[in-house]
Structure formats: structure tokens, C-alpha cells
Image (cartoon, helix red, strand yellow):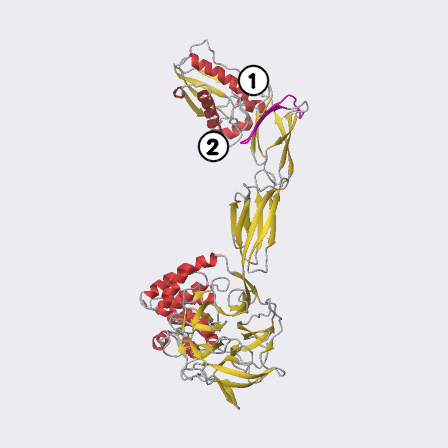
Amino acid sequence: MKIHSFLLILLVLLLPGRLWAKADKKESKELMIANYYYNHYEYHKAIPHFLSIADSLNNAEVFARLGNCYYITNNLKDADAAYARAVKMPECEDAVKLHYSEVLMQEGQYAEAEKLLVEYQKTHKSDQRVANLIAGCKSAPQVLASIPSGSVTFAGFNTDGSEFAPTLWKGRLVFTSDTVIDLKKKTDNWTGHSYYNMYSVSVDANGNCGNEYSEVSRSKDINIKYHDGPGTFSANGSLMYFTRSSYSDRFFNKKSVANKDSVVLQQIMIASDYDTAKKQFKTIKPFKYNSEDYSVEHPTISPNGNLLVFSSNMKGGAGGSDLYVCKMTGNGEWSEPENAGYEINTEGEELFPYLADDETLYFSSDGHEGLGGLDIYMSKYDPTSRAFSAPLNLGTPINSAYDDISLALYADGRSSWISSNRPGPKGGDNIWYYKRQKLYLQVNVFDAVSRMPLTNARIVIRSAKDSLRSTVSSQGRLVKQLYPGENYTVIASDGAYVPKEITKMYTSEKEVDTLTENIYLGNKQVYLALRVLDSTSRQPLKGVKINLRSASDSMSTTGNDDGALFTKLSPDQVYNIAIDKESYFTRFVFLNTASNKMADTLEKNVYLSHPLFTIKNTFNPRHIPEAGDTFIVNVPFVFAAADLQRNSKDSLDEFAKYLEKYSTVRVLIRAHCDCRGGEQYNQDLSDRRAAEVVKYLVAVRHIDPTRLQSVGLGYKEPRIHCNNCENRRNSQLKTLDIPDGKICTEAEHAQNRILDCIVLSK
């Protein structure tokens, strides 16, 4: 709702001579029309004409005026685009940078806004408002990220027009709106919308409203064809002070009246003698301090009727629109207006005052440190010193990065109605119901059986706006402040228990409340049902040795005659299970017992395979080794694995004794792969196999590592040549010499996974 805040500081004058010198005939005409509408404050009409020439003229002042028009008519996205073009041009006025920074703040782009403001401040060092805006850019992200003081609810009677400036009167919520009820209502060329009128809807103490609009007064002298509103009421409801556009009441020429600068000024009108039966005010007269030189608007009266505060752009203020104070004199007249002082007023705009009681003033401003656009502030009036205290920003959710225009409080002070152009279900300015509240959630976690607190439990509390992951206290407890009105998910877990998840909205009617959620977790029961079978016959293998080991426990046992094992395991562990049977390769299986079930049985079938051929050690303990001797060590490897089988270690032990006997011998240990897998994969696999052998000889058999070298050869030196391997091998070796052979069997693949050694020196 930019109509209230853009008159004095926004107008960046074009230089017609310079622009028209660049413009052709058509552009000159469009520019003339655009400037005419702009200079007569008909911004909505000016937009298409500026838009039609902006790109071709490519001038900073044209884009600045186009940005101004968009900003005034509440189109931030297009205002951003136009200002962004303007500020990149060297001839751009400083004021445009200030306006662009305001748009960026309302869009939440605080870092970019701060850069422009700092640049602007270099030539406007005494402008306190700019210093406040810079401070706001620094503090706003933290304020917006903090938990708000309560919740806001969108009022159902809002429209896609503008509804703002709420106040309470006779059990009804009164507000100002440009919603068209009277089809004879004219359109304001400033915004392109209808003129403002005052309406009301029914309301109760809990913020429940009706949706049917009623006019505040049935009198034909209120809600005329031009702007009427906003309004405020005396404590007994018999008087209404309201804002009206300057207006001619001549019978044949009823219209709004502009001053010498073509500005339609605002006036305060006083409606009195309310007739309850006819639902209308009988008498309407102008406020004695209205002027033809400046606007007087947005009145508010204290409950005791002794204080009147309004906004005005009269000369002598801090800048823009300031707040002024009148006192009721002994003869029933208002005293001369006095400026509310520099604690309240800034170089920016101070608007929409609201006296909640005889001393507490709320108002909106874009000149104090805030979140962007207009924010709502609170200040206390001291009748003795006749001064206001430093204003306090009301924070979120009353304020946002957008224009937060005004509020009206209920008598208890806990709830209020606010108006804002923040994003909502409807466009334009809208009215929201605010309820002050601090809500906390205490989560207690217990064992479901013993009912004792679980002191190691982990808690996740999350919503769309925040998230917390933490452990409970020594009492099994966690307390967190919540965003009011948000759906929360609470998850409690403990390693040995089944996690539990709860999702709901936590609500309370109290202003400050701590809600309790008791969560009971049941122990997990995890079992293993293991069967061991022959990989070829698929028959059970009896007498299998099974070793289970995890970080928390270990167990060695033997499978039954059916090759089966059924045992209880610890939950949330990773088990390494070794399965061994004579004349079979040893198998290693990893098993994760994490489960979200109260009781879970993990079923696992394991297949053991025979070594597919027998390799004999070809080293001779009685033969004194010579450099260049080559021999095989019986270390068969499982397909695609590098770990040593248990039956391989017997051969390595014999080899270790051979090395111990000939204690100066140095050997090269070479590992091989079958052809399956890519070249690099097999190279890496054979490297790991050779390294495992060296590791065993050094770590277990204590062979001097300087006597051992290792190398992986992948599938470079196969013992068995087979056609299905040679095609791949020759593509790797870049040769077309394919020896005769046959399709490799599993046994022949196994013979290519061998280990051999070469004596390097005696």
C-alpha cells in the first residue's frame, strides 16, 4: 500500500530536453504522455507508456520512473528489474539507489541492499534513516530466523484488493478497503484500483470474523466516490475521526481537489452524533488543522479522549511524513499540533498511529531499524515530559520484510489485528489476526516396560520452519520452544529400542505454556535364522563352524544337522560372521541388525563352495634357493575377493617356515586374477591379494618386511588360456595372437587366481 509513503522523496525529475534529443517522433510522444501521467501522480496509467520506450531510450531516469511506478503500485518484482537497469547507468541519481535498496530489503536481499545503502551514505552522511536501514540489513536475517512472539492467521474476508488499517468498534472490525461494493465508485489512477472506503465485519474476542462487508455508516456523506479511510473511534464509539482525500462538494462538480502542485492532499474529518437505530453518523465536519498546503491523515484518539495523534507532511518535520500530537484543552478544542519528536520521527515515513491506551502508541515507519518496508513500532508517551520513548520494533510475526502497516489491539493486549502486504492467500494488502504466545514442548522418554527414563535417548523435533537434533538430559528430558501454529514431528530413538514418531500440531490457549509429550520405547528383539548349504547341491551342511563378532559381543557355535542356526543378536550392530567347514572355502558375511521393528528375524542363506582344484606348494624346503627360482604357494582366492581363506593360511605357514630356514632369501610375491572384470579392476584386486599375503607373513609370522616385495599382475600371465578370456586379454594387450583353447570352466578360472613367488636373491 504505497499510496501513503511516496510523495516527497521519490520524484526523480527527468531532463526532457536531453531525452527528447535522443527520441524519435513516436518516442517523444510516448515520453510526453508518460511524463504527464507521472507528474500528475497517475502512476498506473504511466506504466505502459514508460515501458514502451524504456529499452529504446535506455536512460537511467526513464527506468527510475518506471521503477517508481511499479513500486507505488506494489509490484516489487518489476520495480526490482527497472531499478536494477537504472543503477547500472553512470547518470543514475543517488535517490534511485535508495529506493532500489528498499525494494531489495522487502525481497529479503539484505546483503545487496546494504551495498547500495553504504554507497548512498557516502554522499548523505547525516541521513540517520540510511544508518538505520543499514543496521536493519545487518540485524534482519537473525530476527527473521528467530522464533516469533506468536502466530498470525489470515482473515477470511480479505480480497485480492487491499484491506488495511483495522480498528475495533462496537463489536465489529472496521478497516479500509478498495474492494468494489458500489459499482459507481471511481478508479484511482495512482494505483489503478478503486478508491478506499471504510467497511466492517462482525468479530468476537477470539478473532473469529464474519465475511459479509457492511459500510461503517449509512450516511451518504461517508464512503463517497473518492478516498475515505482509515478511521478511528472514541472510547464510547460516538465519534469517528477518519482520513479523506481533499474533495469539492459543489453540486455539479463533485470531485477530488489537487493543490498547486497537482497533489490530492489528505484531510481529517470528524463524524459525530452516531444514530444507533439508523446506523449512521449525523454530523461530519473537517478537523480544524487541515491544510491546503500539506496532508493531515491517519488520526488516533486515546481512550480518555485527551490525546490525538496523526501523520502529516507539513513543513518543519524530520522529513517525509511525521507524527504530530494534539491535546484536548479545557474548552473542548484540540491544541495546536506539536511534532512528536525525533525519537519517533525520521527522514522516512511515520504513519498509521494507534493509541492502545492513554500512553502506549503504536505506529509504522520505514525510517527506523527494521526488517524492510514499513515496520510497526511501540513507544510510550510521558505526559509530564510530553515526550515519547525510543520506539521498540515489535519483531516477527507482526513485522516482516514487507510493508507492515498498522495494528489494533484487543483490551487484553495478547491479540491484535494487523495489516500487511506480505505474501498471503490473496494479493495486495491484507488483514491478519495475531495471537501472542510462547509455546514450549517438553519431551520425556521412558522404557515401555520399566517406565524408567531413558537417559541416552536421541530426539529429533522438526517442522517446516525449524529443526532440532539433540540427546535428552540425565532425566530423559528435552525442552524446546516451538513456532506456534506449526505441525511438528517428534522422533525418539535409543540404540536398543524401536524408534517412535509422533506428528501433530501443538496448541494452547495460554499465552505462555509448556506442553508435555511422554514417549515410551520398547526393546528391540533381533534374531538370526541362518542356513548353510552346499553351493552346488543346495543341500544343508551339518557341523559348520560359525563365529559371530560385533562391537558389543561375540559368539562361536556350530550349526545343527540341518545346517541351521537360530540365535538372538544385539540390535543396531554390524556383525562379521565367519562360516567354516573342512574342504570348503571359508565365507565371511556382514550383517546389520538395525531394525525399526519391535521384534525382527533376519533370515540368511549362505552357500559354501569346494576349492575347484588342488594346488600343491612347489617350493622344496630341502632345496637351497637360487636367484630366479619360481614356485607356487597354495593360496587359492575366492572370485572377486582378496581376503585369505583359512585353509590358505596353512600353506602360508609352511612358506613362512621355508623363509625362516633360508633367512637371507628375498622374494617377489605375485598375485593373479581370472579374466572376469575390467583391466584396472583386476589390477587393483591382484595388488590387494599380494598385499594381504605380505601382511600375513609380516604381522602373523614376523618375517622381515625388507625380504618381501609384492606385485599384482591382474590377468596378464594366465595359467589357462581360454577363448572367452583371450578375446578380452588380447584387446588389453593390443595383440591379435589368439592361442587355441576352449571356454573357461569355473575350475579353470580358479587356476588363474593363484599366487607364485620368484627368488630375487639368496
Question: What's the mark number on residue 143?
Answer: none
Residue 210 in percent (x, y) is at 62, 71
Q: Earlier in the sequence, mark 2 or mark 1?
A: 1
* Total labels drawn: 2
Closer to us: 52 or 433 = 433
Q: Residue furthest bottom?
A: 251
Horizontal and vertical percent for residue 542? 66, 22
Tell me the distance, in whole angstroms, between the alpha carbons under discs 2 and 1: 28 Å
Which residue position holds label 1?
A: 614
Q: Which residue is mark 2?
A: 680
Residue ID at (47%, 81%)? 267
Identify the image quadrant of the C terminus.
Answer: top left
Packing grade of label 1 (10 A; few <14, some 14-19, many >=20) is: few
Compared with residue 340, is residue 110 higher up or lower down, i.e. above or below?
A: above
Quadrant in the rendering for residue 58 = bottom left
- What x and y, as percent, mark residue 536? 64, 25
The image quadrant of residue 312 is: bottom left
Give the x, y percent position of residue 24: 39, 75
Q: Nearer the viewer, residue 358 or 447?
A: 358
Q: How many residues crowd mark 2 within 10 Å: few (<14), some (14–19), many (20+)?
A: few
Residue at (55, 30) in percent of width and height: 550
Q: For the residue marked with disc 2, what is the amino acid?
A: Gln
The question of residue 544 being in magenta is answered with yes
* Mark 1: secondary structure: loop
Stretch in magenta: 537-558
Tag 1: residue type?
Thr
In the rendered view, would you say 507 is above or below 716?
below
Q: Secondary structure at mark 2?
A: helix
Rendered position, 290 above or below 747: below
- The mark closer to the camera, 2 or 1, is 1
